[in-house]
Amino acid sequence: MNMKQFTNLIALPLLLAALISSGSFAQAHSPSQARDGGFVVSPYVQLAEPDSIYVVWQLEHRKHKALGVEYGLTEKLGQTQAAELVAKQSKEEAIYQAKIQGLKPNTRYYYRVKTDTMHSAVHHFITPALHQAEASLHILATSDIQGGAARFKSQILPNGIAAWAQKQHQGDLAENFDLMMLPGDLVNRGPQLTEWHTFFDAMHPLMAHVPVYPAIGNHDGGGPIYTKYFVLPENGTQGHLERWYYKDYSNVRIITLDSTIKFGDARHALQHTWLDDLLKKTATQSHLDFVLFQMHHPHESELWIGGNHAFTGQVINKAETFSTATGKPSMMLYGHTHGYSRGTSQDHGHLMVNVGGGGHHLDQWNEWLQNDYDRYQVSASEWGFAVIATSAGENPELRMQWHGSKDGKAFSLNDSITLRKHNQPPAKAEIAQDVISKDVPVEKMQLAMAGFNDPDNDELIESRWQIAEDAAFTSLVSDHFQARRNQYKGQDFNADLNLLRWQLPSLPLEPGKRYYWRVRGRDAGLMWGPWSDAGEMTAAPGQTSNMLDTASNWQLDEKRNQGSFVYDADSDTLRILPKGAPTARAREWVKISKTLPLPADIQAGKARVYYGGTLSTSPLEANTLARACACVWVEIFFLNKQGNRIGAAAPLSYESHVKKTMHKQVLIPKGTVSLLVELTCGNNNTDGTVMIEAPYLKCAN
């Protein structure tokens, strides 16, 4: 039963609102309404077209006669479509389906399943509009319900999804959502039929009215049961139908892929060939403005890097190339990691969104190997759902909103981003007059952009700064991005960042040598503006020294991990060896009272810490999903005189054997008397080494 029918039954909208706010939506459905008597799985809709739709259900006994779906434009119904047997799930149980045809586009229909001895409750759906109608859409997305079906049913659905729907269309889910995307791990143990029964019971208030388009996840059992329950487009590769497919709604194309295949399997090549052909076709179809991809595994998961999959990264590269070449923005939805993340491609109109907060236990911060990726702006350990709203016509627009909750009781809008098909780029950046870039130490240099102008009145969400040895910028010294947000481990490390200015870290600039710099800005629609004209800069000798005593003060954190570390003085390299342990960590404490002559500047909020080095990991053999197998990260914590942490700097983190030099700086919080520096090595159950060359920690006012 959907929210609108429930409202009609009690005739008291205020009571419905009270039920939603108290979390009792699921309890308001009687057992016969949540799962109709005699039905193992109550009727739900699948594969909606403007003129047809499938109704699917599962019965306890195959002895029932005259199976069919009654349907019509009113609750009186009036027409009947005979059913067909899809699969025998056990000795008695069976799945049936009926395809209702001859329907009108964008029209509400009522239906129920009837046998010779019983019938289901009356439900309803709304057929999609023809793409020529250029209809707007609302797409619901979440993932990894997995073992959390009870939480989805009792918390996420009533307190989140239904509460949101009540504010939009009085709770009518068919009016609120045109479809739902579900990128994998629908259940926890795919071969167990009872888990599928539990999943459909939790999902029935939605699926009775809204068609769901899933991607298969690694917990879904490889597909034998999964494919029997779902009617999906059969436009993928022959022999692998319904494992990958596409579906069009209005001006949006949804492409679903299978990332559960082991890396190197020939089916990956089949998917790539199919996807390449489909993207070529999509590029020429003018009525399509946006492309949404979904698959189960992430490419860069900040909450759990062990879940990363190289195949997803390959698809993202194709999506980025497609969006840049065609001007059609794209988005990748995935799960596997239990939480939320949102990233943006640095040079393309492409989003990456983790919607894995569908109900299973959350991945917590510091529980797994984790990484603060440059391309991701927001990550949160929370349950929730995304609503993707699109419009068509002359100015197509896509808006993604994430509604999250830490406890499953109170949901809030925690992230939002809007893309436009015809986004105008920002104006050319200009260098500000108050730049500090001549004949001063690097630590005192500050580059600046003179404002930000955008013809669409978009706000500035990113700035990019380059320093080079030549005016043509062919020999880069630094290519630095600053984003409006960097929500990681419960803290926005960029909350106080001014995107119009860049306080330089301790870059290796040669004193007295002329360098060149430039800047440009990016608007909220992911469009970069032109580079500014080049400015000049020269550095004076530095006035601070490296405070890291790499020879003596590093200690191994033996309470939490096992392993060892070694310092090579000749190469100024610190190495950590986990020796098969999940992580190993080395620490060094730096006392400001002994090392820093800046206590007054710290209390005045004027002192900064500069830190960096060259990070890398030892090459490791990838596992079957080609995941990253080792990572290294450097964290700095600010301690007060009691030794309590009062703040943290944005971490340096990396997971590749290709060396990367990283530099950062941050204001030292007032009350700081010492710094704790931690260098951590993590691996996926395999021996590996991480290292940092020339690590440094400097302070300056």
Image (tube, grey):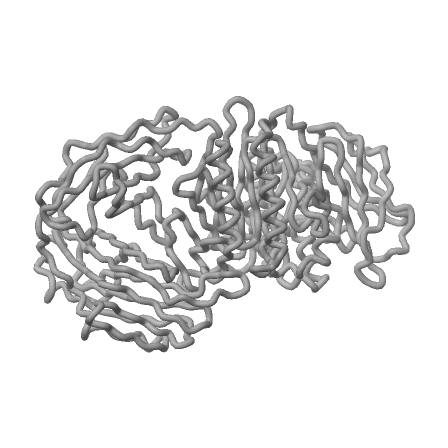
Q: Is residue 12 visible?
A: no
In-image side of 517 versus 134 (left or right): left
Asked where in the image residue 519 lies, by quadrant, the reply is top left
Q: Is residue 567 visible?
A: yes
Q: Give the residue at x 56% y 27%.
A: 392
User: Could you tell me residue 133's position as x and y percent?
Assistant: 64, 24
In-image side of 584 versus 403 (left or right): left
Of 669 and 36, the residue lying toward us: 669
Task: Quarter of the image for the N terminus: give it.
Answer: top right
User: Could you tell me residue 349's position as x and y percent?
Assistant: 45, 37
Q: Give the residue at x 64% y 24%.
A: 132
What count of labels does the image hold? 0
Of 174 and 321, the residue lying toward us: 321
Q: Is residue 428 above or below residue 490?
A: above
In-image side of 49 versus 77 (left or right): left
Q: Give the residue at x 22% y 68%.
A: 571
Q: Is residue 10 above or below residue 642?
A: above
Q: Give the residue at x 81% y 55%.
A: 87
User: Could you tell me residue 353's position as x and y percent?
Assistant: 49, 46
Q: Is residue 617 above or below residue 381?
A: below
User: Could you tell me residue 650's position as x and y percent?
Assistant: 30, 54
Asked where in the image residue 52 lies, by quadrant, the reply is top right
Of 403 and 391, the residue lying toward us: 391
